[in-house]
Image (cartoon, grey):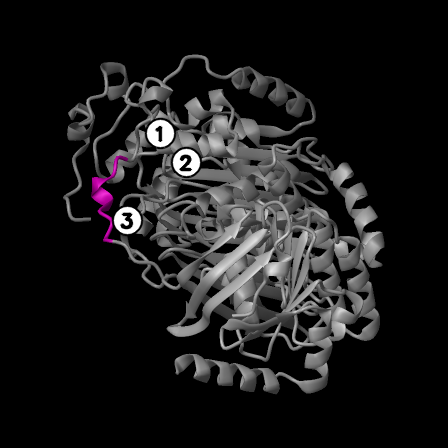
C-alpha cells in the first residue's frame, strides 16, 4: 500500500488511463482502495445495506492483516493501491477486433485443444456482437432449472433477487476474517456465481458450459456460493480448458460450498490462466480460497482440480466435516512448467463422528517449475471414528524443477485412523525411449506417461472434461522434453 | 575379419553396419563392427558379458545415451542413424527390450493401440478403432498364450518376467516390423515360457522379415534356429558361422575365441 488512498471525488472524476470510450469510462473507478471505493462499488451494484456493511467490515479487517508469507512461492510485493477494483463491464473495444490480431501462439493452442472457432474468439477476448446463442441457451436452461426450484445466476443477480439466501449463507463458510485475500475479496468482489438447489432436488445437468460464458469478465475478485439443501445433488464445473486472455495479474477468488443433510456437491475445476512466458515474465497470480462445509449428517463434498495455468497458484480447497458421517474428498493434479509456482493442497477438518476424507494429490513439475503440496488433516476431539487417507505423488521432468510436500496432521481423538502415503518419481529416459521405440513421438509419450500418473484424478472428472484435461496436460508440457 | 560373403543374396540388404564405433560416457564400447543382414535371415549375436551386444541393439533402435563415433548403418538403403527413435520404429525397426519398462497408470492396451496407430498413420493406412484393434490383438494373443487381463493392466507393471517378454513379442506381432532386434529375450524365462516365446518368434519368421537375436546362451537357439551366428568380443564381430558355431560356443565357452582373436591381432600387428 505504497500510494496514498485517493479521495472519493477524485475517483469519480479521474479519467481511466487506458483510454476507454466515454460510456465505459463512467463505469470504471481509478486505481486504489478505500472505504469510498467500496461504497462506490456497492452503490453501482445497487446493493442492499447489509452487503455494504459486510464489505466495509471486511475492508476494515483487511487493513489489520498482513499478506501471508508462509507459502512456498516467490513474487515481487503486490501494490494493492495500484489495482482498479471496479471496471464493469470490461471494454471489449480494448481487445482485439478479430482473430487475426490475436497472438498466433494462443491460437495454435486452441486449435490443438480443438476449441470451436466461436469459442476461440470469446476466449481470446475478440469484440464480436452476438457471438453466442449460448446466452439464449443459458436462458432456456435457466427456465428448466427454475421450474425445479433451482436458482442459478450471477452473484449480483442473486443479491437483487434472493437477498435472504445471500445474507444467510455469504461468509458462513469463509468468513472475511479468514485470511488476507479472502478479506480483500469480501470487500471488493464484483461478481461471480450463485447456485441454490432446494431440498431433495437432483440437478439434472452439469452446471458448466454456460457458466463460463456467464462468468467471463467477472474480474479478478470473483465470488461463488453454492448451497445444496437437504438431500440435494449438484455437479459444478468451473473454468475452461483453453488459456484465457486476461489483463489482470492478481486473482483472489472465494468459493463457498454448503452441503446440508445428505446433500452432495461435486466441484470440478480446470484452471488454465495465462502462466507467463518461457522466461517467467507475466502470468496470473491465482490466490484463491475455496472451502466446503459438510454441514449436515451424511453430506458429501468432492473437490477435483486440474491446475495447469497461472504463474503462481495458491489454493487449498478444503472441507469442514461437521455433520456426522460426512465425507470430504480432494483430487488434484497440479502441473508447473517453465517458471510456474504452485503451492496447493487441502484441509480436511473432522468434527463430526465417523467422518471420512480422501486426498489424492498429483504434482507434476517440468522446466524450472516448483510444485508444493500443503495439506492439513485435523481430527477434533469430537470426531470419533474419523478416517483419512492421503496420497501425494510427485513426478519430475528434467533436473531443474522441484517438488515439495508439507503434510500436517493434527489428531485429538484416539479412535481416528489417518494414513499418509507419498512418492516422488521421475519420468525416466527408459520410459520415454520405450514409447518412442514403439513409434510414439516424444511429446505423445510424455503426455501419455503423465496421464497415466494422473489417472486416479482424471477418473473423478466428468467424462468430457477428463478428455479435455488430458489434452491440456499435453499442451502444457510442450517443450518440456527434448 | 571373417567373411560374410555367403549372406549376400539377391536384392538389397535389410541392414548394413559398417565399421561402427560407439561410445558411452567416454568409454568405447563398439570398435569397428560390421554386419550385413538380408530379408528373411535370422542372425544370432552372441558374446561374453560386456562385449557390446546390448549396446548394438540399443544403438540400432536409436537410444540417445550412446554416441556414434564412427562408421555407418544403412537400413533398407537409408541412413538409419539420421532417424529419431520413433521414425525408426515407424519405418519397421523393432526392439524387444531386455528389461521392458513399467509405465504406471497407462493400460497396456492403450500403449499398444497408440503404437499400432502411429505406425499405421506413418504408412498412410487408416487408424484402427477400439473394436477393430481389440479383435486384432485377441487374435495375436492366442499365439502367445496370453491372458486377456494383461491388456488392461498398466504397461509391464506387476508382470512376471515371462509375461513381460511375451508382451514384447506380442508388440512385435502387432507392429509387424521389417527388422526385429531381440535383446536377451530368453533371459529370465523358465523353460515353458521360453517355448511359448520361441513359438511366437518362429511364427513371425518370414521371407520379408529379418531378425537379430542378441543372446548370451545357446538355449534360445535350440528353439529359434538362426541362419548365422556371430560372436562379438571387445566391440567387434570376431567370428561368424552357421548355427553349429553356437553349439561350439556352448561346449567350449567364449575363452578360446578371445585367445584366437588375440593371436590374430598380434599377427596382424607384425
> Visible in this render: residue B250?
yes
- Disc 2: host chain: A
Q: Indicate the position of residue A290 as horizontal and vertical percent values.
A: 49, 49
> Visible in this render: residue A394?
no
- Disc 2 crowd, CA 10 A, few/some/many (<14, 14-19, 20+): some
Q: Is disc 3 in the same subunit as disc 1?
A: yes
Q: Nearer the viewer, residue A46 or A95?
A: A95
Q: Which residues are magenta?
A: A76-84
The quadrant of the picture occupied by the C terminus of chain B is bottom left
- In this rendering, would A183 be left or right of B236? left
Q: CA distance from mark 3 to mark 1?
A: 18 Å
Q: Main secondary structure of the magenta part?
A: loop
Q: Residue at x 75, y 53 (%)?
A: B205
Q: Indicate the position of residue B32 as horizontal and vertical percent values.
A: 45, 67
Quarter residue B135 falls in: top right
- In this rendering, would A366 be left or right of A392? left
| Numbered mark located on residue A51 in the image | 2
Q: Indicate the position of residue A420 as horizontal and vertical percent values.
A: 59, 70
- In this rendering, would A384 be left or right of A58? right
User: Which residue is labeled 1 in the image?
Assistant: A104
User: Which residue is labeled 3 in the image?
Assistant: A279
- Disc 3 crowd, CA 10 A, few/some/many (<14, 14-19, 20+): few
Q: Are marks 2 and 3 in contact (CB under 8 Å)?
A: no
Q: Is disc 2 in the same subunit as disc 3?
A: yes
Q: CA distance from mark 2 to mark 1?
A: 43 Å
| Numbered mark located on residue A347 in the image | none
Amino acid at each position: 500500500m505504497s500510494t496514498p488512498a485517493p479521495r472519493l471525488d477524485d475517483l469519480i472524476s479521474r479519467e481511466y488511463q487506458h483510454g476507454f470510450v466515454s460510456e465505459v469510462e463512467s463505469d470504471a473507478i481509478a486505481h486504489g482502495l478505500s472505504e469510498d471505493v467500496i461504497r462506490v462499488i456497492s452503490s453501482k451494484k445497487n446493493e442492499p445495506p447489509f452487503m455494504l456493511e459486510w464489505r466495509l467490515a471486511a475492508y476494515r479487517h483487511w487493513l489489520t492483516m498482513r499478506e501471508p508469507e508462509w507459502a512456498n512461492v516467490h513474487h515481487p510485493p503486490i501494490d494493492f493501491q495500484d489495482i482498479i477494483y471496479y471496471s464493469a463491464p470490461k471494454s471489449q473495444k480494448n481487445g482485439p477486433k478479430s482473430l487475426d490480431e490475436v497472438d498466433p501462439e494462443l491460437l495454435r493452442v486452441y486449435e490443438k485443444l480443438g476449441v470451436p472457432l466461436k469459442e476461440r474468439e470469446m476466449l481470446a477476448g475478440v469484440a464480436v456482437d452476438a457471438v453466442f446463442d449460448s446466452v439464449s441457451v443459458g436462458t432456456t436452461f435457466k427456465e428448466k432449472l427454475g421450474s425445479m426450484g433451482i436458482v442459478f445466476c450471477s452473484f449480483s443477480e442473486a443479491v437483487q433477487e434472493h437477498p435472504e439466501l445471500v445474507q444467510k449463507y455469504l461468509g458462513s463458510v469463509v468468513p472475511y476474517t479468514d485470511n488476507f485475500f479472502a478479506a480483500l475479496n469480501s470487500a471488493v468482489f464484483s461478481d461471480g456465481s450463485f447456485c441454490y438447489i432446494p431440498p431433495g432436488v437432483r440437478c439434472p445437468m452439469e452446471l458448466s458450459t454456460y457458466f463460463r460464458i456467464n462468468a467471463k469478465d467477472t474480474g479478478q475478485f470473483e465470488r461463488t456460493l453454492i448451497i445444496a439443501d437437504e438431500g440435494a445433488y449438484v455437479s459444478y464445473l468451473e473454468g475452461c480448458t483453453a488459456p484465457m486472455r486476461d489483463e489482470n495479474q492478481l486473482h483472489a477468488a472465494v468459493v463457498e460450498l454448503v452441503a446440508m443433510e445428505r446433500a452432495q456437491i461435486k466441484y470440478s475445476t480446470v484452471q488454465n490462466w495465462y502462466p507467463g512466458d518461457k522466461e517467467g515474465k507475466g502470468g496470473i497470480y491465482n490466490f484463491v480460497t475455496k472451502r466446503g462445509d459438510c454441514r449436515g449428517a451424511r453430506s458429501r463434498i468432492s473437490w477435483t482440480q486440474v491446475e495447469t495455468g497461472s504463474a503462481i497458484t495458491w489454493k487449498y480447497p478444503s472441507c469442514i466435516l461437521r455433520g456426522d458421517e460426512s465425507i470430504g474428498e480432494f483430487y488434484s493434479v497440479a502441473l508447473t512448467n517453465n517458471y510456474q509456482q504452485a503451492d496447493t493442497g487441502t484441509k480436511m477438518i473432522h468434527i463430526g463422528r465417523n467422518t471420512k476424507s480422501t486426498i489424492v494429490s498429483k504434482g507434476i513439475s517440468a522446466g524450472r517449475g516448483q510444485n508444493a503440496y500443503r495439506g492439513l488433516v485435523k481430527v477434533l476431539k469430537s470426531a470419533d471414528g474419523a478416517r483419512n487417507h492421503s496420497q501425494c505423488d510427485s513426478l519430475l521432468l528434467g533436473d531443474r524443477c522441484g517438488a515439495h510436500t508439507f503434510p500436517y496432521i493434527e489428531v485429538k481423538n484416539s479412535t481416528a485412523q489417518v494414513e499418509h502415503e507419498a512418492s516422488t518419481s521421475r519420468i525416466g529416459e527408459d520410459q520415454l525411449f520405450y514409447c518412442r521405440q514403439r513409434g510414439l513421438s516424444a511429446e505423445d509419450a510424455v503426455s501419455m506417461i503423465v496421464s497415466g500418473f494422473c489417472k486416479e484424478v482424471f477418473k473423478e472428472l466428468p467424462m468430457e472434461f477428463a478428455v479435455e484435461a488430458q489434452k491440456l496436460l499435453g499442451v502444457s508440457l510442450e517443450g518440456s522434453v527434448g | 575379419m571373417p567373411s560374410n560373403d555367403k549372406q549376400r543374396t539377391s536384392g538389397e540388404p535389410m541392414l548394413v553396419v559398417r565399421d561402427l564405433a560407439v561410445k558411452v560416457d567416454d568409454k568405447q564400447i563398439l570398435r569397428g563392427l560390421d554386419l550385413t543382414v538380408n530379408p528373411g535371415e535370422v542372425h544370432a549375436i552372441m558374446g561374453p558379458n560386456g562385449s557390446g551386444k546390448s549396446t548394438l541393439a540399443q544403438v540400432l533402435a536409436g537410444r540417445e545415451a550412446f554416441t556414434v563415433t564412427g562408421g555407418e548403418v544403412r537400413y533398407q538403403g537409408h541412413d538409419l542413424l539420421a532417424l529419431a527413435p520413433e521414425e525408426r520404429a515407424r519405418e519397421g525397426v523393432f526392439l524387444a527390450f531386455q528389461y521392458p519398462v513399467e509405465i504406471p497408470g497407462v493400460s497396456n492396451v492403450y500403449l499398444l493401440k497408440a503404437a499400432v496407430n502411429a505406425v499405421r498413420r506413418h504408412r498412410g493406412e487408416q487408424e484402427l478403432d477400439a473394436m477393430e484393434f481389440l479383435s486384432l490383438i485377441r487374435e495375436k494373443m492366442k499365439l502367445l498364450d496370453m491372458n486377456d487381463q494383461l491388456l488392461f493392466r498398466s504397461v509391464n507393471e506387476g508382470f512376471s518376467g515371462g509375461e513381460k517378454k511375451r508382451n514384447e513379442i506380442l508388440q512385435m506381432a502387432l507392429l509387424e516390423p521389417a527388422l526385429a532386434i531381440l535383446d536377451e529375450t530368453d533371459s529370465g524365462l523358465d523353460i515353458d515360457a521360453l517355448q511359448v516365446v520361441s513359438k511366437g518368434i518362429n511364427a513371425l519368421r518370414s521371407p520379408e522379415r529379418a531378425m537379430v537375436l542378441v543372446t548370451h546362451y545357446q538355449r534360445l537357439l535350440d528353439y529359434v534356429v538362426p541362419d548365422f551366428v556371430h560372436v562379438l568380443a571387445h566391440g567387434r564381430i570376431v567370428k561368424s558361422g552357421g548355427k553349429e558355431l553356437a553349439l561350439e560356443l556352448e561346449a567350449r565357452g567364449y575363452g578360446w575365441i578371445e585367445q584366437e582373436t588375440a593371436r590374430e591381432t598380434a599377427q596382424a600387428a607384425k
